[in-house]
Amino acid sequence: MTTSIIPTLENLYDVTQEHQDNRGDCTLQWRRGKLLVKPPGQVKQPYLPALNSKRSLVECLQHSPVSLVSIDPKLGEALLRFWADACEEAQKPIFLSLPASQKLPNQPFRQLQRLIDWIAAFMLLLLVSPVMLGLIVLMQVYSPGSLFCHEWRVGERGKLFRVIRFHTQNTTPLERWMGKYSLDNLPQLFNVLRGDMSLTGFRCWTLEDAVQINKLPEITALWEVDAQSHPLHLDSQTL
């Protein structure tokens, strides 16, 4: 049985302009076990203090029946990152909500392409592993500190994931040289092995790209919103 950590869902309020100054203000709706995170609208919403605290939001998601989160890119980069970090910690997948016009036709050979990507990435890792080991040693000598960084990207079907890169700030000759020849991106081969990325096909956007461009070519939503279904608000289920 799911236990709610929200104090109360009885006091509803209108999400209007006067409430839109706080970072956590957004419209939350249920659809088929999935949580939709949208910009504020003229709807009745329960007051959720968890939306102003990442720790509280993480606990809220962990104790909820949410199977995945879909978030509107119109909420802005800060809120996208806030929800992405919380969902990652709560081990809930998070996707950008994309319009139906952005959906691609079915790809019958997708599994074959993924297998080819995996084999190619594995072979490339074997080939470049001496180079990567050499870069790690040089980075430890000339630019000590964190070796890797993990940045949010928008992958296939709008899924948000952490891309792996060598941590370079282009402050040393070594880092500038690595950036010039894109050697800092070599660890992304591990993302390909995990199925986050493909060696060919769609481009993985940054969160900034997702907000500014407003539409993301060559990626589709993981699940389809049925226009005929009636959304259930948070006051109808336990979160």
Image (cartoon, grey):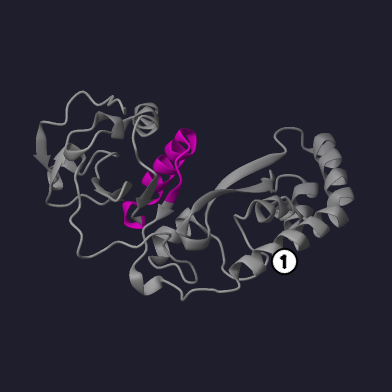
The residue located at (42%, 53%) in the rendering is: 95
Given residues 214 and 230, the one toward you in this image is: 230
- The quadrant of the rendering that contains the N terminus is top left
Is residue 48 rendered to the left or right of residue 65? left
Given residues 83 and 224, the one toward you in this image is: 224
**Which residue is identified by label 1?**
116
The residue located at (52%, 62%) in the rendering is: 156
Circle 1 SS class: helix
What's under tag 1, amino acid-wise?
Answer: Ile
Q: Is residue 88 above or below residue 96?
A: above
Q: Position of residue 233 (x, y in %)?
A: 19, 44
Residue 115 inside the magenta-drawn segment: no
Q: Residue furthest front?
A: 1
| Location of residue 147 (image quadrant) | top right
- The quadrant of the rendering that contains the C terminus is top left
**Circle 1 crowding by C-alpha within 10 Å: few under 14, some 14–19, many from 20:** some
Q: Is residue 59 visible?
A: yes
The residue located at (19%, 47%) in the rendering is: 232
Q: Is residue 121 above or below residue 18?
A: below
The residue located at (34%, 63%) in the rendering is: 224
Q: Position of residue 204 (x, y in %)?
A: 55, 61
Range drawn in magenta:
73-94
